Image (cartoon, grey):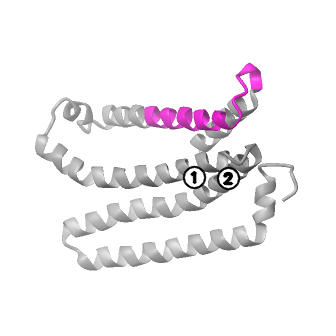
Amino acid sequence: MAAIGSNIFFNWLLVFGSLGAPNLGVGGSGWATTITRTLMAVVIVLYAFHRDARLKLGLAASAKRVDPAALWSLTRMGVPIGLQYALESGVFSLATALISRFGVVSAASHTIVLNVASFTYTVPTAIAGATAILVGQALGRGDIGEARRTGWIAQGLALVVMAASGLTLALLGSHIAGLFTNDAP
């Protein structure tokens, strides 16, 4: 929630040039997101080290040692996932660049649609991440039944969330768009 508030604040600041900040228009939204994500990363790192110091988990000590086998295992698994996310983001960025050629209204409309779509996509993505962890833990314990149950429950939950999102967009789409602009739909 703090990150959402931060992003809203920096969008207000940089898109509209509030409080004496430069008026960057649509580009200010990109800067707002960059600033917010950087702050999120800093907060996560600070929290991890604070929690480590308080609970004496050994994170700081382990950060000084590098385990090449573990690093390679994480890299082998993480690079394809990272590439998939990079390609996905790249396609959205390319679409934004192409649509911006049609003018400011088209670019702004596209940005509104992406913001709303991203919001509906974020919850199922979080469910998928949590599911991957829980299924991995169950498989690590050798509990195939628990892994299977967790997967099915997560699919059902994601289905409910996406159905609710779709219904909300179908019934309240113009009202949601109205949160972004005063222009007629």
Task: State whether residue 158 is above or below residue 18.
Answer: below
Q: Identity of the amino acid at label 1? A: Ala
Residue 116 lies in what quarter of the image? bottom right
Q: Residues within 10 Å of mark 1 (few under 14, many from 20)?
A: few
Q: Going 33% across and 55% down the picture, which residue do you hit?
A: 81
Q: Identity of the amino acid at label 2? A: His
- Location of the C terminus by quadrant is bottom right
Identify the residue under disc 2: 110
Q: Which mark is residue 95?
A: 1
Q: Going 59% across and 37% down the picture, which residue do you hit?
A: 30
Residue 42: image x %, image y %?
44, 31
Disc 2, SS: helix
Q: Identify the magenta region.
A: 18-43
Q: Residues within 10 Å of mark 2 (few under 14, many from 20)?
A: some
Q: Going 21% across and 52% down the picture, which residue do you hit?
A: 76
Residue 9: image x %, image y %?
68, 35
Look at the image and say whether residue 21 sits in the magenta stretch.
yes
Q: Is residue 87 left or right of residue 116?
A: left
Disc 1, SS: helix
Q: Is residue 119 left or right of residue 139?
A: right
Query: Would you say the magenta stretch is mainly helix, strand or loop?
Result: helix
Tell me which numbered mark, 1 or 2, is placed earlier along the sequence. Answer: 1
Residues under numbered marks 1 and 2 in contact, where contact means CB atoms less than 8 Å apart: yes
Task: State whether residue 39 is above or below residue 150.
Answer: above
Look at the image and say whether residue 38 sits in the magenta stretch.
yes
Residue farthest to the front? 101
Q: Going 65% across and 33% down the picture, which residue do you hit?
A: 28
Q: Is residue 118 left or right of residue 55?
A: right
